[in-house]
Amino acid sequence: MARRTQGTSAGLDRARIAAAAVALVDRDGLERFGVRRLAQELGVDPMSIYHHIKGKAALLDAVSEAALGEVAVGADEDAPRHWEDIARRTAHRYRDMAYRHPRVFPVLVTRAQTSPVAVAALEELVSAMRAAGVPDRVAADAPMVLFGFLNGHLLACTADEPGAVPAFDAAAHPGMAALAPLMEGFGSRAEFDRMLETVLAGIRLSSAS
């Protein structure tokens, strides 16, 4: 692709740059990602990107925002109203996004998510919790509890070489050996649903105490 000279518009905007960056990370991984390689993909001078996004850190934030945009959905009549249903819907869409973009997902886990799309998702959850009478202390903790689980679990499940349940020595670790058959299905939808319900039950219990 012929590169445009510095200062040429090239029809760039933040959304187009972010989408190209997500596609590049999906394909080549974070290790090879940079502004110059992205500029090559877009056929522009690197300074054309800097005109819209100021540096690699800001570019990674744009990548995060683009990925989270796949999780967010506009309000509609069928949208859930109860906080638990909102949490379930958000969690499943977040999981789907992580599996679509396993090489992008570590960016979301390791960088603070303060973009408007991220804050809007949290606002929807905590507003529903407060409307349901959940104590503010519990509502304030809930996003960290929920996304702590989601980020840790999904980071392990979407790794290049996801782990598996090891064969435990029954003599040395009888408890783990006995439970090992119940740990099969690592990364499955059933496992995810089961663990998510455990997290939600804990939040529910805290709100009642």
Image (cartoon, grey):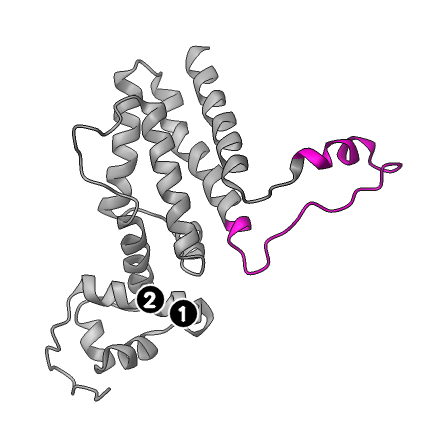
> Label 2: which residue?
23
Quadrant in the picture for the N terminus: bottom left
Q: Residues within 10 Å of mark 2 (few under 14, many from 20)?
A: some
Return the residue found at the far right. Answer: 171
61 versus 68 height, above or below: below
User: Which one is in front, 168 or 12?
Assistant: 168
Q: Amino acid at mark 2?
A: Ala
* Pointers 2 and 1 in contact (C-beta within 8 Å): yes
Helix, strand or loop at label 1? It is helix
Residue 172 in magenta?
yes
Position of residue 121 measured from the top left corner of the image (x, y, whole percent): 28, 37
- The answer to whether 126 appears left or right of 190 in the picture is left
Position of residue 11 measured from the top left corner of the image (x, y, whole percent): 11, 73
> Label 1: which residue?
27
Q: Amino acid at mark 1?
A: Arg
Position of residue 205 measured from the top left corner of the image (x, y, whole percent): 47, 15
Residue 169 in magenta?
yes
Q: Measuring 26% from the left and 26% from the top, which residue is drawn there?
A: 80
- The answer to whether 61 appears left or right of 105 in the picture is left
153 versus 23 height, above or below: above
What residue span does the magenta drawing correspond to? Answer: 155-182
Helix, strand or loop at label 2? It is helix
Q: Measuring 52% from the left and 26% from the top, which residue is drawn there?
A: 198
- The answer to whether 108 appears left or right of 202 in the picture is left
